[in-house]
Amino acid sequence: MFTFTSIAVYHQELKDNHTSCVEAVKHFIHQIETKKHLNAFLEVFADEALVQAQKLDEQRAQGQKMKKLHGVIVGLKDVISYKDHKLSAASKILTNYKAVYNATVVERLLAEGAIIIGRQNCDEFAMGSSNENSAFGKVLNDADNERVPGGSSGGSAVAIQAGLCMISLGSDTGGSVRQPADFCGVIGLKPSYGRVSRYGLIAYASSFDQIGIFSKNLEDVALTLEVIAGKDDYDSTVRNEPVETYSSAVTQEKKYRIAYIKQTLEHPYLNEEVKAAIYDYIEKLRQAGHRVEPIDFEYLDYVVPAYYVLTTAEASTNLSRYDGVKFGLQTKETTTDLTDFYKKNRSAGFGKEVKRRIMLGSFVLSSLYYDSYFTKAQKVRQIVAQKSQEIFSIYDALISPTAPTTAFKFAEKNHDATEMYLADIYTVFANLAGIPGISLPLFKSKLGIPFGLQVMTNQMKELPLLNLSRQMVQIKG
Ligand code: GLN
């Protein structure tokens, strides 16, 4: 029987002829079928994946060397373009749309021998924190089917949690990789803004969006990052810094200077169990020889409003391209007026949350309110960036809860947008500052629900981030 623990173990088993890529693909197709009720995948590319696996097995039989991601089975959040395959952003507005090119990350995965197994469910246009906003139904948390998997990359997190693929790629604009990873008990990394190309990623809020990685182990996160990161002629926001060998460098034994923001742990929204677990864990970090100190950040309550003003503003312009003219949903209703035609398509195609954000974004950008909202939010972003630089001039890392609660129940928060938005209180800081963040699955609640802890470092400091993370997962929560 096929079992998956890590890419290194899988590759060794391939070398020893104990398994094959075909066997691996068959295993995951079977798992996806068995766990269909979770609704993690919108489409499975079963036949193609098998053909690809066959090819890889033949290449190896002919003595070809294995590439970094030889036969590694990857799922893509349905906002990442895979040429000639459907791409929906979990929205009706993209009905029957097919990607016309590969995202840079997809090109790089394929070039290293990865096999793309399917498209993963998510919140519509990556907007949400619970996966209840998908046009194709909610995704269930495999730890408790009455609970949300988190969002917006819920399908990608559950696919790892339930063993439906080896690696998932998601996107993180305000926490959409880290928060679902937290809720599902897996690892979720959001790299620095500019570390990974966004070319071929459906835009939500372009100055925040970043592609991230889900896995059950850090070595595989490091290896995948090494493959997908780095300069890209198609995305000028990618930084030029060379890609470090994250996979081989995650071995140093270094003691770190770690900060935590007092206000995050003393926040009234923070669940008591999560709070106690993290205070407890801070002691363990100290016992392990790391220096952990409290710091102040008096503007914590401004980060969520600032994030939602800026991202909805960007979303309102990014989503203006979906008008049903050249692609996507076109309603059958007849009209001779062009504006009316747009309205009909957009009204029928977008879901409630996406509409809310387009309206909110248009409002904060309107001339009368621009200064009171957009300009103010930009100032908050500036303060966050300054604070972040101040922190990292003294400390190597910043830790916090990933989310204020563990995975909540369906329908618990979706009646109140503000309450849902507050689920992002700890994750948006990293997006506002452009720094990397990772959620590590360290804890379990009394009810058996997994939750984690977030670690952040300075921009482009993924190497120490992964190194410290490796030490942290060894210190049990
Ligand atoms: N929950 C946040 C939002 O709804 C984050 C989304 C994301 O990171 N894509 O905007």
Image: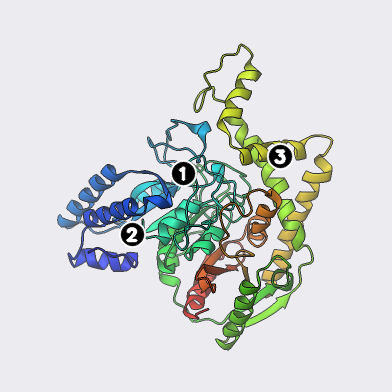
Residue 10 found in image quarter: bottom left
Residue at the disc numbered 3: 361
Where residue 22 sits in the image (x, y, percent)? 22, 53
Colouring scheme applied when the structure was drawn: rainbow
| Residue placed most toward the observer, 6 or 340 | 340
Where residue 182 sits in the image (x, y, percent)? 53, 64
- Relative to 340, is 30 above or below? below
Amino acid type indicated by mark 2 = Lys
* Marks 1 and 3 in Cβ contact (< 8 Å): no
Where residue 191 sits in the image (x, y, percent)? 54, 58
Residue displayed at 68% across by 57% down: 422
Asked whether residue 396 is in view, the answer is no
| Residue placed most toward the observer, 37 or 366 | 37
For label 3, the SS is helix
- Relative to 303, is 271 above or below? below
For label 1, the SS is loop
| Residue placed most toward the observer, 464 or 161 | 161
